[in-house]
């Protein structure tokens, strides 16, 4: 017996699964007309956004520290199973070796996304004797991330 309709809970959990966040790299020739290529084998992609802390305390603050945000930065820590011939991972490795910045897209589960330019500041290949080979890297932002944009179809998935 096949079912096509299922009841939905009224108090639906708003949590999202980490597996549904994806990292793409622009393998096209321009930023204006990107070719988004998935970095294959992703296990994690941790987006970090920070601001420097500027001390704005003074003698009248009652002994409490006061801070204001300074320069902001972002980075993406990435770990992927190393898939031989994966175009996205190969592009990242080539960019690292050539010392080039990459145009990246960080996609949310609802297909909305942010984009930005980054420098691959770490690119490591781990090859344990008892596990799969993994590619690990850190993409350090070069300027701001874009505002969140609505999802669109990918030219290459």
Image: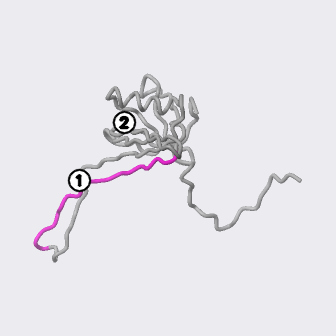
- Range shown magenta: 43-60
Instruction: Kindly identify which numbered label has been placed on residue 106.
Output: none
Residue 47 magenta-drawn? Answer: yes
User: Residue 111 vs residue 53: left or right?
Assistant: right
Direction top: furthest residue: 29
Foreground tag (2 vs 1): 2
Secondary structure found at label 2: strand
Rendering coords of residue 80 (x, y %): 49, 42
Secondary structure found at label 1: strand
Q: Which residue is mark 2?
A: 117
Direction left: furthest residue: 59
Q: Is residue 98 visible?
A: yes
Q: Which residue is mark 1?
A: 70
Q: Is residue 150 visible?
A: no
Direction right: furthest residue: 1
Direction bottom: furthest residue: 62
Q: Quadrant of the C terminus?
A: top right
Q: Which secondary structure type mostly characterizes the magenta part of the structure?
A: strand
Crowding at mark 1 (Cα within 10 Å: few <14, some 14-19, many 20+): few
């Amino acid at each position: 017996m096949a079912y096509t309709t299922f009841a939905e809970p009224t108090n639906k959990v708003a949590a999202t699964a980490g597996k549904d966040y994806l990292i793409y790299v622009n393998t096209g020739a321009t930023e204006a007309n990107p070719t988004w290529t998935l970095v294959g084998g992703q296990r994690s992609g941790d987006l970090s956004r920070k601001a420097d802390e500027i001390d704005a305390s003074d003698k009248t603050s009652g002994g409490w520290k006061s801070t204001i945000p300074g320069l902001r930065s972002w980075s993406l820590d990435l770990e992927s199973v190393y898939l031989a011939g994966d175009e996205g991972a190969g592009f990242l490795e080539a960019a690292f070796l050539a010392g080039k910045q990459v145009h990246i897209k960080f996609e949310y589960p609802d297909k909305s996304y942010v984009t930005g330019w980054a420098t691959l500041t770490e690119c490591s290949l781990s090859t344990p004797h008892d596990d799969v080979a993994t590619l690990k890297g850190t993409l350090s932002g070069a300027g701001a991330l874009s505002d969140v944009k609505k999802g669109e179809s990918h030219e290459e998935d």
